[in-house]
Image: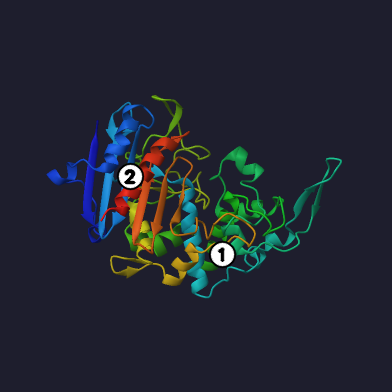
Amino acid sequence: MFRKTLTAAAAALAVTVALTAHAALFAQSEIAKALEPFVDSGKIPGAVSVLAKDGQVTFDCVGWSNLDKKTPMKPDSLFWIASQTKEFVGAGILLLAEEGKLSIEDEVEKYLPEFADVRVAETNEDGTVTLRPPKSKPVIRQMLCHTSGLPFITPEMSHIGYDAIPIRPLAAVIAGTALTQDPGTKYAYSNIGIDIGAAIIEVVSGQPFADFLDERIFKPLGMVDTTFWPNAEQLSRLVTPYQIEGDGCFTATTVKNRHYPLSDRAVRFAEGGGGLFSTPQDMIRYLVMLSNKGIYDGKRILSESIIDQLSTKQTEEGIGENYSFGMLAGEWIGHGGAMGTFGAANFSKGWAKLWMVQLYGNCGEAKKAWDDAAGAFFRAE
């Protein structure tokens, strides 16, 4: 069984996080003890846990990023983080709002005129469908908290993939997709609502969406491996995606609904609903920043006002889901991804946690064991 545990001062993360030949790095932690049985019993091929508390960041890497090659999980293993991408769209919109370049209550058509003709689809008693104007026009906030009325994806995306259309033309395709209910009346998880947020970032900032995130978030945080298009070196660290077929039975697969080669910018485009790839050591930087009320390594990345908005429920009164701008709201703010990744930050405590796997299928038992062990870690004096 492979395992490595790394503990380093959070400030050191601003420079680099690397495994070095020091005995302390190989000490067995309670997190590793909790996760190893799930690797040994074939419930998961491997996982990376990262916990941040009291200025210390602890990495626990168990199992394998590739079972056949017996490639170990590492802090710089590359994962498709899928819907964790959404939280960066939310942060980007709030950065532009704070600069006075938009309001979260602006109607979407102010920036994307094609939304002027958006319609709601209603099914009649005889089975026919009527298209009618919505009772209110969708606003930016609703796009980011999944109450816009948009479905999960468009019919086109289900056939050609989620990353096949550049973000601004994709917005025009989305505008032609009927709403399933009036904006603000119901929560319905929508990738394309977040894609509209990304398109608005492009229009308002005057930059490609990917460049905006690089300039405003990734580069200031030193997130050198967070990208929509992993290069050859990064791909050499890509964790093999697996489909769970049963205990001990994993089938290697691909990142679904994405075009290959993953590095090809001519056939793949930045997608706000779930297009990013990243590493544990990159993602923990973002989460530590959130847990520190927007500051990382002495640099302010997001204002305290933005952090407050991210932690505040943005779904309408009467809607039970606690969702803010591209992330879950509450004491812990963050998001998960389609292949099991999950990260969250608690800025009232200054804590952050990250769980990285790469699986299609149910790994809930392992995730719960990690949650329990992480909870004990944070409660310990």
Q: Position of residue 41 (x, y in %)?
A: 34, 26
Q: Secondary structure at mark 1?
A: helix
The answer to whether marks 1 and 2 mark residues whose Cβ atoms lie closer than 8 Å is no
Q: Earlier in the sequence, mark 1 or mark 2?
A: 1
Viewed as shown, does residue 20 lie left or right of 95? left
- Tell me where residue 67 appears, x and y as whole percent: 33, 28
Q: Say if residue 311 shows up in the picture.
A: yes
Q: Nearer the viewer, mark 1 or mark 2?
A: 2
Tell me the residue that label 2 is attached to.
373
**Tag 2: amino acid:** Ala
Which of the 4 image quadrants contains residue 159?
top right
Query: Label 1, label 2: how many angstroms apart (C-alpha)?
Result: 44 Å
Residue drawn at (45%, 44%) of the image? 264
Determine the residue positioned at 60% across, 63% down. 140
Residue tagged 1: 203
Residue 120 in the image: above or below residue 253: below
Residue most toward the right? 126
Front one among 15 and 376:
376
- Which quadrant is home to the N terminus? top left
Above or below — where is 83 with respect to 109?
A: above
Q: For the point 84% across and 45% down, which residue is it?
A: 124
Element class at badge 2: helix
